[in-house]
Image: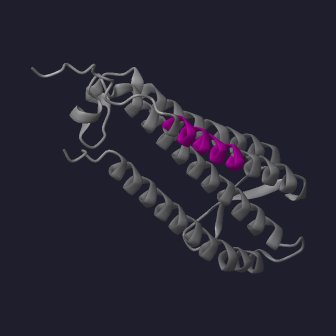
Amino acid sequence: MKKTQSRQPAFPLRFTTMKSLLFAFGILALAWIFFFVEIFKWYPRLPEHVATHFDWAGHPNGWMSRAAHLKILIALGLGAPVFIAAICYATRFIPAAFVNIPNREYWLAPERRAQTSTKLFRHGILLAAIMTAFITGVHLLIVGANLAVRPGVSPTAAETVYADFVAPASHALIGAFVVAIAVWTVALVLEFRRPKR
């Protein structure tokens, strides 16, 4: 006669999962600290009218006041990451049909739903940190472009300076962001592979 074993939850909320969640929070916190340090470090040095938008060749085609730039930057630096993390956290409450992950039926089964939602939240926090780093990079690019043009420089010379700095720097920043998103996506897919029996 076979002994009946007590069944344990398939995916208990292990300490390692919470530890990795705290690690993700730490990365986001560091990203935010760096973000605010760089904002208030460079804000007083920016001109009253800041070039904030550039075409693909690096020429400025949009300006705003320094104060407006600060407000928009803080709104983006806080709002976008919080929104991303909140969406991932909400996966524990919304119907499974609206959660788009690999092997959804397996990972969102009732006995695995809690731990799966915690994992998604961790990935959301890491994505929020990537977004914060990208917005910080955009801010530093804008700062560099505006400080590179000294008062009294002719518009033609200024556009040349902008193009020489902004175009390569922006291309590098976008490239780094794309690579970071690709790595994050691969990690998400690997996380939710269906385990082999």
Q: Position of residue 94 (x, y in %)?
A: 36, 22
Work out whether residue 62 can be spotted.
no
Looking at the image, which residue is at 49% across and 38% down? 17
Looking at the image, which residue is at 47% across and 43% down? 123
Q: Which stretch appears magenta?
A: 17-31
Query: Is residue 30 highlighted in magenta?
Result: yes
| Count of residue discs | 0
Quadrant showing the N terminus: top left
Residue 75, located in which quarter of the rendered image?
Answer: top right
Q: Position of residue 191 (x, y in %)?
A: 36, 47
Query: Is residue 21 highlighted in magenta?
Result: yes
Residue 52, located in which quarter of the rendered image?
Answer: bottom right
- Position above or below: 9 against 182: above
* Nearer to me, 146 or 31: 31
Chief SS of the magenta region: helix
- Position above or below: 177 against 22: below
